[in-house]
Amino acid sequence: MQVVAAIYRLAIALWLGGAALFTFVLTPILFRSESRDVAGRIVGLFFPGYFRWGIACGVIAIVCRLVMGGKWTAPAAVIIALMLTLSSFQAFYIEPKAAEIKKQIVSFETTPKDDPMRRQFSKLHGVSAVCNLSVIAGGVVLVILL
């Protein structure tokens, strides 16, 4: 049972660490060092894997909680379920929709901000950012609960 508990803690730590690294370190470095279009293209290439990483960590954490027993309605289990739901929403709805819209925007540097496609993309980006920060906040709470 100690091995399962260790895998559970590792899954949470890797999920939170991956999200924090991507959000607060890698993405800002890319956008500071490259043009907006190049940085956006690079980040867009990483998104599918980034979201799959979160989903994999979440599934592992849920399986570990089930194996360890305990109440499924415990705060940690609810937080994991919410985080997994948000990551799945980003992976299977927001990211594909945003990628499709991005294809229709020739350049974020030259396309006016009030362009309908840019406005649509900005809305999706805002929803995705809230989901992402919520996943990170949930991860922080889970680490504190450990």
Image (tube, grey):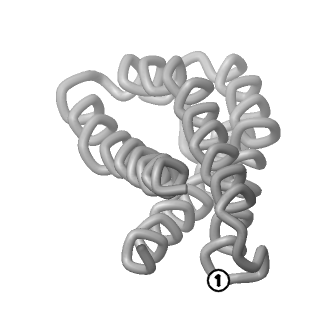
The vertical placement of 127 against 97, above or below, is: below
Residue 97 image offset from top left, x and y in percent: 78, 33
Disc 1 packing (10 Å; few <14; some 14–19; many ≥20): few
Picture residue at 47% right of the left edge, 48% below the top: 3
Left or right: 136 as drawn, with respect to 79: left
The vertical placement of 120 against 136, above or below, is: above
Q: Nearer the viewer, residue 42 or 13?
A: 13
Residue 79 image offset from top left, x and y in percent: 64, 72
Q: Disc 1 marks which residue? A: 75
Q: Quadrant of the N terminus?
A: bottom right
Left or right: 123 as drawn, with respect to 34: right
Residue 84 image offset from top left, x and y in percent: 70, 54
Picture residue at 49% right of the left edge, 29% below the top: 108
Instruction: Tell me the kind of residue under disc 1.
Output: Pro
Total of numbered circles in the picture? 1
Residue 71 image offset from top left, x and y in percent: 75, 79
Q: In which quarter of the image is the C terminus?
A: bottom left
Left or right: 128 as drawn, with respect to 45: right
Q: Nearer the viewer, residue 3 or 114?
A: 3
Label 1: state its secondary structure. helix
Picture residue at 63% right of the left edge, 49% below the top: 58
Picture residue at 37% right of the left edge, 47% below the top: 23
Q: Which of 89 and 142 is in front in this view?
A: 142
